[in-house]
Image (cartoon, grey):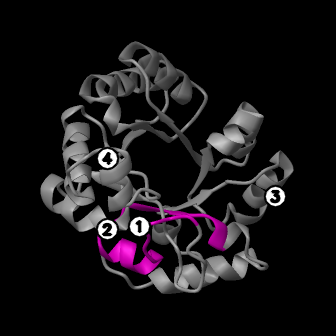
Amino acid sequence: MINEEIKKRLVLALDVEELDEAKKLVDELSPYIGTFKVGLQLFCGYGLEIVNYIKEKNADFFLDVKLHDIPNTVEKASYNVIKNGANFFNVHATGGIEMMKAAKKGAMQAAEKYNRKKPLVLAVTVLTSINQETLTNELSNSKNVEDFVIQLAKNAKLAGLDGVVASARELKAIKKELGNDFIVLTPGIRPSWSAKDDQARIATPKSAIEDGADYIVLGRAITKAENKIEAIKKIYEEIQGVNK
């Protein structure tokens, strides 16, 4: 059932309350999942405990901390992210080009010093919980969401980053503007049989892969499923045969 090409593109969000719960997910699902995403919820609670546990299982992890600060601070934080073993991490594109350059610099310095493989540094464009109404009325941004995402993605590429975090709705436009080698990690993935939850701009696993996603982030559709392995099998079946 395990397809390595599909597996390496699946990112599971460990958005759970307790360390033991996260460990159980890693234990059960590491044969089927390429990368585990450690976000602020878990990292602020348990820090390197969960990071080290994932490393002990020889699994990859994505540190989803969305760095956003002055360039010097982000450079040093990025260095420590890679020092502690992350395979990739993200920063906010709205921090600007110089901040993103600093993130890349810090990450590459740590990778060289600690003999790590080249890390992926991605820029968060517009959160999938933000829709056009929020962007316009609350954030006073007159651009439409897609145009704003493309602008931020172009800035990320100028800064030397490897790709962006963006919703499936912007996938085709990003690939068209910035090329197929520019990585897109897509959150807000919901199988057709799962609940929408709090995401505003979502897609199914199959449609996201078809539109060019390099990585897709799965969460509650799996972590809250009564039978998690069966849920993953259904996702594998859905993606199987998609050409990209």
Identify the image quadrant of residue 159. top left
Q: Position of residue 141 (x, y in %)?
A: 26, 46
Q: Are marks 3 and 1 in contact (CB under 8 Å)?
A: no
Specify the amino acid type for callout 2. Answer: Arg
Which tag is nearer the camera, tag 4 or tag 2? 2
Question: Which is more toward the observer, 140 or 104?
Answer: 140
Alpha carbon distance from label 3 to label 1: 29 Å
Which tag is nearer the camera, tag 1 or tag 4? 1
**Residue displayed at 82% across by 55% down:** 21
Within 10 Å of disc 2 (Cα), the crowding (few <14, some 14-19, many 20+) is some
Alpha carbon distance from label 1 to label 4: 19 Å
Alpha carbon distance from label 4 to label 3: 31 Å
Q: Which residue is mark 4?
A: 163
Q: Which residue is mark 2?
A: 169
First-in-chain label (4 vs 2): 4
Specify the amino acid type for callout 1. Answer: Arg
Specify the amino acid type for callout 4. Answer: Gly
Q: Are marks 3 and 2 in contact (CB under 8 Å)?
A: no
Identify the image quadrant of residue 92. top left
Specify the amino acid type for callout 3. Answer: Lys
Magenta residues, as a range?
198-221
In the structure shown, which secondary structural element does the residue marked by tag 2 occupy? helix
Question: Which is more toward the observer, 94 or 154?
Answer: 94
Alpha carbon distance from label 3 to label 2: 33 Å
Q: Which residue is mark 3?
A: 24
Q: Are marks 2 and 1 in contact (CB under 8 Å)?
A: yes
Could you tell whether 31 is left or right of 152 in the image?
right
First-in-chain label (3 vs 1): 3
Q: Which residue is mark 1?
A: 201
In the structure shown, which secondary structural element does the residue marked by tag 4 occupy? strand
Alpha carbon distance from label 4 to label 2: 16 Å
